[in-house]
Image (tube, rainbow, N blue to C red):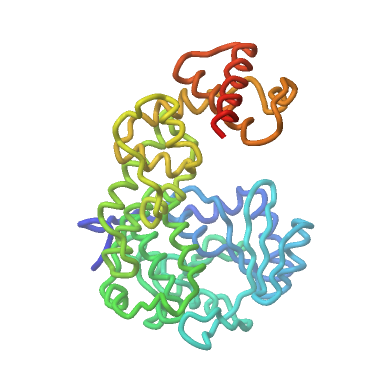
Amino acid sequence: MVGGNEMNQSIRTDIDRLRPFVEGHPLLAGLATHSRVEQPLYLTGGAVRDLLIGADITDYDLVAESGVAELATGLAHDALIHERFGTAELVVDGIRIDIATARRESYAHPGALPDVEPGGIEEDMGRRDFTINAMAVRLDEPETLIDPHGGEDDLRRGVLRVIHPGSFTDDPTRALRAARYSARFGFDLDHGTAELLAGVDLGTVSHERVEHELRLAAAEATGIDALRLISSWGLVEIPGERLELAAKAVSLLRSDTWRGRAERSVVVLEAAFGDSPELPVSQPSSPYAGVLLARGLRPAELILNRARGAEWLDLYENEWSLVAPAISGDDLVAAGLPQGPAIGVGLAAVLRAKLDEGLSGIEAELQVAVAAAAASEQED
């Protein structure tokens, strides 16, 4: 087996959670009536997986046999309908819901987007990526788990398994997804799934689809572990030192100085694949010199440089970057300076004096700016 840990983690599942959850959920309980009276409606995918293991559910995947557009717009007038795939996206009372038509899929060639046609719920489960995501619950019969591929057993054993041998050929990005789930749950790949990794060809799909999966992986708490698996499986090469840098940078996101300054996924991907400028590790000769070095860099680039050892960036972030002239270019024009480069020279001189010499006061700033501008004009 191939996985994220030396030993896979078994997870306790509980089918008895299904009925109380559905019947106690205001939205699902109402949809259960629709399922009983109008047509069968199923809760599927990750929501069922997470419900079985007692994890928080953030997104709800529903499957209907027909009438997805009507059902979705009945729940939310602004539902986003995708006619080609028979799916809809909506938010109800803060709950994100995806509704899909039960379908089977075929692929014209490896990596192609699927061609879809109507199918039953078990056929719909058969088009999923992994067995642990191929379970369903009919909302008006929530005590019964629909599990045609043994997903619950794999979930309990801590095993990630594709549903059929052509899974990675149909959609190679599933291999990237396998790393994300393996890292998240601490699961191993079953032997057959691990053997299929050798045949994965990400070149059959667009860069956008690959980048999308990498972003999803990087955003997770175990994202660095997922990227490490992706690299060790030979899917995308990521040097180990880059992942070590990513880990240091992510730890900085928990500090008072850098918390909230950049999204985790952006920092991790920049560390893994970016080409950010490298600032000197040693303290700049002055605060103004530090500002000249650091300003213009994106927050993720600053955090990575801090992770490389540029501790002076804490001062830049907490103090130096907050300093700005109290006067503006308009003030300098009003003081008699002509529009042009001299304005910028004057404001730069003020910033330097404020940072390095403690200059304060509007009158003092005007004097410094006018003098610096005049001196630059004489040099020209």
Q: Is residue 129 above or below residue 348?
A: below
Q: What number of labels is visible?
A: 0
Locate the C terminus by quadrant: top right
Tell me if 344 is positioned left or right of 301 in this view.
Answer: right
- Of residues 311 and 103, which is closer to you in this image? 311
Where residue 258 appears, as percent x and y from the top left, is 44, 33
Q: Where is residue 80, by image quadrant?
A: bottom right
Locate the N terminus by quadrant: bottom left
Residue at 53% from the left image edge and 23% from the top image edge: 323
Where residue 7 appears, as percent x and y from the top left, is 21, 57
Tell me if 307 is positioned left or right of 264 in this view.
Answer: left
Q: Is residue 30 above or below residue 141?
A: above
Q: Where is residue 184, by image quadrant?
A: bottom left
Q: Is residue 320 above or below residue 69?
A: above
Residue at 69% from the left image edge and 46% from the top image edge: 93
Q: Where is residue 164, by image quadrant?
A: bottom left
Where residue 314 appears, as percent x and y from the top left, is 39, 28
Residue at 52% from the left image edge and 58% from the top image edge: 47
- Of residues 285 and 143, which is closer to you in this image? 285
Tell me if 55 is positioned left or right of 308 in this view.
Answer: right
